[in-house]
Image: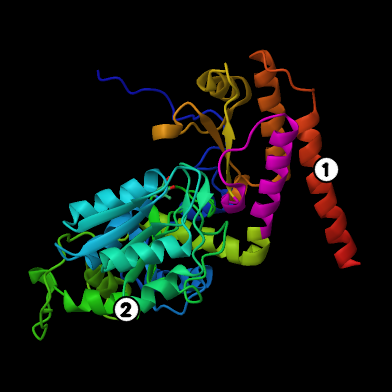
Amino acid sequence: MPELFGDLNPPPRLLMGPGPVGVDPRVLRAMSMPMLGQFDPAFTAYMNETMELLRQLYRTKNKWSFLVDGTARAGIEAILVSLITPGDKVLVPNFGRFGFLLAEIAQRCRADVVTLDREWGTVFTPDEIETAIKKHKPRVLALVHGDTSTTMAQPLKDIGDICRRHDVLLYVDATATLGGMDVAVDEWKLDAVSAGLQKCLSGPPGSSPITINERVVDVVKARKHIEAGIRPDDFVEGNAPIIQSNYFDLGMLMDYWGESRLNHHTEATSMLYAAREAVRLVLAEGLDNCFARHRLASEAITSGLTAMGLQLFGDQKNKMANVTGVVIPANIDGETVRNMMLHDFGIEIGTSFGPLRGKIWRIGTMGFVCRKENVLTCLSALETCLRQCGVRTQAGVGPDAVLAVYRAAETSARKAAE
Ligand SMILES: Cc1ncc(COP(=O)(O)O)c(C=O)c1O
């Protein structure tokens, strides 16, 4: 008799790494709703509602704001494979692990990829990006917004104008920031943006919200192709080269999400329910309130860590609001502390990659997990773990500093309401 294993019974964890984070129970509840057929009018209405909610989240009028099924890289891959024709020049300003990912995906699309590299913990100035555009004349600029590997956020405000001046298409990976920091798609002239659910949107990994504007739609339409089995008789093939992937062909995805409702994949029903609920909850809280909640947690955790005598990692002016990098003190084994956090306190904090491996911890305060009690719990636990490992910290200083930031914010909110 083959082994059947026990009940699925994951240990309770407080997920304060760089994602995934704890899912809002209301999102889990939405995921348990019954299946519907993918062309049932009740289901297509949910698809349309999801598109409308995504427009509000992305602060865009883009008609084509929808979900790509798969984790965040599914959205990245769908956009890049649909934009890039083999041989196109793609410029990737690279300031962390996920810049490497964009470059790698673009290479697999057979682009001629040029990277512009910066030391991890820093970001680019608009001038640096413009100079590189003038030099390399790319067709596409692919840029990460918040790179969780370094905890830095690249300011985007001026990049769209620069790209328009030089007729470059701008793609942004907002996986780790959407819902926690502003991603003002229309105002900042971002041509295509993708994200994931598992960070500031408090959903599970497995659905990638994307938005594309008319500049991108034109490229996709010129490459238009429809599978033979579902192709209408009067269909005219686009005259530009076909998109290399079927699953990630944005043209066919648009036919499925749009009025023609042409069959493509079977939409991941429960993930659509999750995305619709996750985005709805962020909008119900209010985008500005949500960003302010993440900023406040960042302020609180950075004061707590500093009070504990720890050094924050990277250029603090460009720190992501939802992830904090902390330098692991000398003579301390970062993995011993992470293991104690997990096994003694049930709290997950992150390690790092590449040049930062073993050098920093990354603490996430995002989405559903981004709240006062979790920041306090995490720093109280970290303080104990550090003390057990021989770091001398004054008991209580970290949580006290966290509490002071929250108390000050609560007082000013009360005064403002009076
Ligand atoms: C900035 C960024 N881009 C892309 C990804 C990849 O996302 P996924 O693992 O959901 O494919 C991540 C995941 O952490 C990320 O932080």
Q: Which mark is residue 104?
A: none
Residue 313 at x, y = what percent? 57, 38
Q: Which mark is residue 215?
A: 2
In which quarter of the view is residue 300 placed?
A: top right
- Determine the CA span between mark 2 and mark 1: 48 Å
Q: Mark 1 points at which residue?
A: 404
In which quarter of the view is residue 262 placed?
A: bottom left
Who is closer to the viewer here, 130 or 200?
A: 130
Residue 40 at x, y = what percent? 34, 71
Q: Quadrant of the N terminus?
A: top left
Look at label 2 and name its amino acid: Arg
Question: Which residue shows up at 31% across the image and 70% down it?
Answer: 39
Residue 94 at x, y = what percent? 38, 50
Residue 37 visible: no
Residue 261 at x, y = what percent? 27, 75
On screen, 394 above or below 54?
A: above
On screen, 128 above or below 216?
A: above
Look at label 1 and name its amino acid: Ala
On screen, 146 above or below 248?
A: above
Badge 2 crowding class, 10 Å Cα cut-off, few under 14, some 14 to 19, many 20 or more, is few
Q: In which quarter of the image is the C terminus?
A: bottom right
Say left or right for 157 vs 211: right
